[in-house]
């Protein structure tokens, strides 16, 4: 069963299963955010956190909730949504679940560019991440291009470029002082420690600015899932469309990397999980955004609950993403695509 919305300029169809799955995911996201607010080394009671949000509570309660936990949670949600959207776009466009920005080296390029910006200028992390991701995309696409962009060739070249950029990041770390290198090493794993309202503003304003383009991209992406010949016969120009989607995906990935670090496997896992929950053959961008936000929030909350030591959230996203990658590789083997 499905519901349709038809306007003079827009036509949408939503299935009953998509609505049910979306409602459950939003409920899990809300419960996860509430648990993340309450839990930690300074635990809030069942109602004290709500009193602080309503403007009451003690000074220390307000400081911990409003200056530390809430900005961290909102940054995690925004960065996770950016990772999920970026991954789903690349995977749908390339018709390959392995073609996500964290696998084909775009996240490594963004993090390497951000590191260079920190070392050379002491700031401009967003600009460094954007330049690094764009440079990596040009390099990977340029090397993979041969009579068109073949997905398997792009994945293999992207893997190689990603490993090379990771080695370059290690080299940059070795050229800095020990304290800076330790902070940067934690950031390279992916962490949301010490995020503030500036990070919240950055990730959410960027996401809102890009939202209209993401909404528009959903429609041509659904056609790109078909064969090239069929897509061209529908009147779509493949190369400009793919370049535009690549640029949009890179902006989203760079935005997420500069606020949360290159959290591994979030962009990779969010899209396949969303498509498995609602298998209707569509890009599932909204579902990937919610799954990405849920993964990053869960990983960051878990990282704060480990006693005695605060592990980076990237450790937990890798624990989640590793099995998902093995499952996807087995599926690709069975389909004869690897």
Image (cartoon, rainbow, N blue to C red):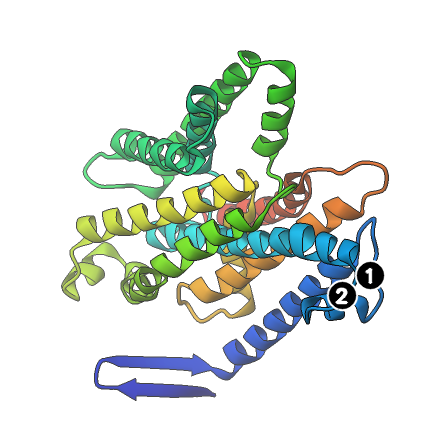
Is 63 placed above or below 310 here? below
The one nearer the camera, 301 or 152, is 301
Q: Which mark is residue 161?
A: none
Q: State how far apart marks 2 and 1 are (Cα).
A: 6 Å
Please tell me in which quadrant of the rendered image residue 85 appears.
bottom left
- For label 1, the residue is 44
Outermost residue, front direction?
Answer: 59
Circles 2, 1 touching at the beta carbon (< 8 Å): yes
Say which element carries label 2: helix
Task: Give the mark nearer the N terminus: 2 vs 1.
Answer: 1
Is 293 placed above or below 118 here? below
Outermost residue, top direction?
Answer: 175
The quarter of the image holding the C terminus is: top left
Query: How would you rate the neighbour count of disc 2 (Cα within 10 Å): few for under 14, some for 14-19, many for 20 or more?
Result: many
Report the label total.
2
Residue at (68% x, 71% y) in the render: 54
Residue at (57% x, 74% y) in the render: 21
Q: Position of residue 62 (x, y in %)?
A: 72, 58
Say which element carries label 1: loop
- For label 2, the residue is 49
The one nearer the camera, 326 or 87, is 87
Q: Position of residue 129 (x, y in %)?
A: 41, 35
Q: Position of residue 9 (x, y in %)?
A: 22, 80
The one nearer the camera, 13 or 23, is 23
Is 234 placed above or below 333 here? below
Q: Position of residue 252 (x, y in %)?
A: 40, 49
Is 270 on the left-hand or right-hand side of 94? right
Please tell me in which quadrant of the rendered image residue 250 appears.
top left
Q: Is residue 116 visible?
A: yes
The one nearer the camera, 246 or 332, is 246
Q: Is residue 335 visible?
A: no
Query: How would you rate the neighbour count of disc 1 (Cα within 10 Å): few for under 14, some for 14-19, many for 20 or more?
Result: some
């Amino acid at each position: 069963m499905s519901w349709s919305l038809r306007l003079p300029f827009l036509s949408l169809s939503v299935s009953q299963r998509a609505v049910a799955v979306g409602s459950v995911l939003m409920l899990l996201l809300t419960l996860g955010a509430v648990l993340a607010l309450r839990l930690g080394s300074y635990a809030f009671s069942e109602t004290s956190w709500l009193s602080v949000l309503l403007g009451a509570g003690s000074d220390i309660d307000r400081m911990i909730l409003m200056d530390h936990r809430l900005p961290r949670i909102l940054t995690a949600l925004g960065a996770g949504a950016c990772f999920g959207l970026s991954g789903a776009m690349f995977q749908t466009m390339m018709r390959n679940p392995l073609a996500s920005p964290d696998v084909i080296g775009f996240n490594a390029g963004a993090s390497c560019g951000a590191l260079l910006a920190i070392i050379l200028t002491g700031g401009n992390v967003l600009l460094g991440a954007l330049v690094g991701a764009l440079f990596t995309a040009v390099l990977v696409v340029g090397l993979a291009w041969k009579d068109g962009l073949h997905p398997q060739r792009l994945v293999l070249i992207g893997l190689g470029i990603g490993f090379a950029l990771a080695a370059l990041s290690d080299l940059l770390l070795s050229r800095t002082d020990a304290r800076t290198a330790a902070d940067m090493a934690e950031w390279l794993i992916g962490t949301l420690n010490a995020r503030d309202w500036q990070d919240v503003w950055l990730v959410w304003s960027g996401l809102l600015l890009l939202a209209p383009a993401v909404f528009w991209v959903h429609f041509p992406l659904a056609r790109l899932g078909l064969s090239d010949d069929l897509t061209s016969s529908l009147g779509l120009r493949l190369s400009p469309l793919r370049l535009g989607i690549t640029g949009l995906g890179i902006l989203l990935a760079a935005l997420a990397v500069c606020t949360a670090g290159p959290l591994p496997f979030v962009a990779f896992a969010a899209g396949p999980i969303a498509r498995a929950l609602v298998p209707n053959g569509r890009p599932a961008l909204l579902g990937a955004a919610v799954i990405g936000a849920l993964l990053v929030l869960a990983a960051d909350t878990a990282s704060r609950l480990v006693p005695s030591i605060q592990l980076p959230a990237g450790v937990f996203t890798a624990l989640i993403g590793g099995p998902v990658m093995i499952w996807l590789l087995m599926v690709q083997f069975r389909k004869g695509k690897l």
